[in-house]
Image (cartoon, rainbow, N blue to C red):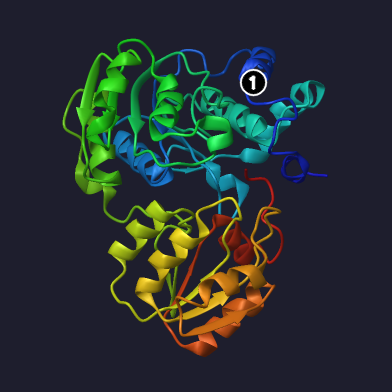
Amino acid sequence: MTNVDWLESLSPWPREGFGTDRMRALLAQLRDPQAGLPAVHVVGTNGKSTTTRMVEELLTAGGVRAGAYLSPHVRSWAERVRVAGAEADLEAALHVVRPPAERLEATQFEVLTAAAFVAFRDAAVEAAAVEAGLGGRHDATNVLDATRVVVLTNVSLEHTDVLGATREAIAAEKLAVVRPGCTVVVGEPEWEGPARAAGAGEVIVEPGGSPALAVAAARAFLGREPDASALEGVSLAGRLERRSGEIRDGAHNPEGVRWLVEHLPRDDYTVMASILADKDVDGMLEGLAGVGRRFVACRSSSPRALPPSELGDRARPLFDVVEVRDDPHDALAVAHALGEPVLVTGSLYLLTDLEAGSGAGGRP
């Protein structure tokens, strides 16, 4: 079994609840590769990966040997860890992490996070853009001790059983990654006060979306104006990804759908989707109905995916044509037959399934 195969076999969920104790123990056995690492820590509900990737690009353009840690992935696990403008050698990093991780029974995300820090140390990374996984306070990434900038992209209701039942409670969980005196960039002005209360030395309000957030974060980190032209051509798999006859985007909540709809060039798509049962399914469907009248329901590999028959039933009042297929590849063929362009969305699990031809695996 390769180290990546071993990684994929791990549980993404901690058995005894979320927290950083095991993560800190794992890093201690690895000689704390994260210690002293200057970082831009990105938290929020939507847009984290794009913002993180853009910060990486701006730091690199500014002459910094930068790394980036992203999640989830669409095409391969290696997408998640980047060093000096390219994917790191994830297999090599996992080789280092695996023995202590097995002893401690670390989770999949803990292993990945530790592997990222090992890769950064081994490559002499000077700064890293680090995306939080779930929340902030108890997230495995909340072990950084030299964070210079925190970015809070936005806040919506998500994972309320873990993060809290209100946006204010969720924002507090996310802002728990703030280190005393660091700069915090917020994409929504209502979080300026909570950011200061969390210990921010300076708060920058920047509501212009991922590019503007990334520029503000890089400016704060570098202490000078970054070269915004470095963002031209930056793209991520599964984020408004254009392919022949289709667009793929992993929007997985109403806010993500709203952003997607605003950025689509037309309104006559065949919409193909799988949606997790614990999401606001009806809110997402209502948004998607604004960009097409044809809908194909399918099931991603996530155990939390809504059964396609139920998704189809909930879509029928909103769409003129509704088809139901269990397998994503069959569903994609049906969607193209119904009429292009096709919009594939609702879950990054679904996009990964279409890439791999099998289960997505390993994402909470």
Decide if residue 285 is in sight here.
yes
* Residue tagged 1: 23
In the rendered image, the vertical position of residue 307 relative to residue 361, given as above or below = below
Q: Secondary structure at mark 1?
A: helix
- Residue at x 61% of width, y 77% of height: 331
Identity of the amino acid at label 1?
Answer: Met
| 274 and 353: which is toward the camera | 274
| 314 and 136: which is toward the camera | 314
The location of residue 132, given as percent across then percent down, is 49, 33
The location of residue 163, given as percent across then percent down, is 52, 31
- Residue at x 52% of width, y 78% of height: 316
Count of numbered badges drawn on the protein: 1
Quarter of the picture containing the C terminus is top right
Q: Residue furthest left?
A: 225
- Residue at x 40% of width, y 33% of height: 42
Q: Is residue 252 left or right of residue 306?
A: left
Q: Is residue 235 left or right of residue 71?
A: left
Q: Is residue 68 left or right of residue 291?
A: right
The location of residue 190, given as percent across then percent down, is 25, 31
Label 1, residues with CA under 10 Å away: few <14, some 14-19, many ≥20: many
The location of residue 187, given as percent across then percent down, is 27, 37
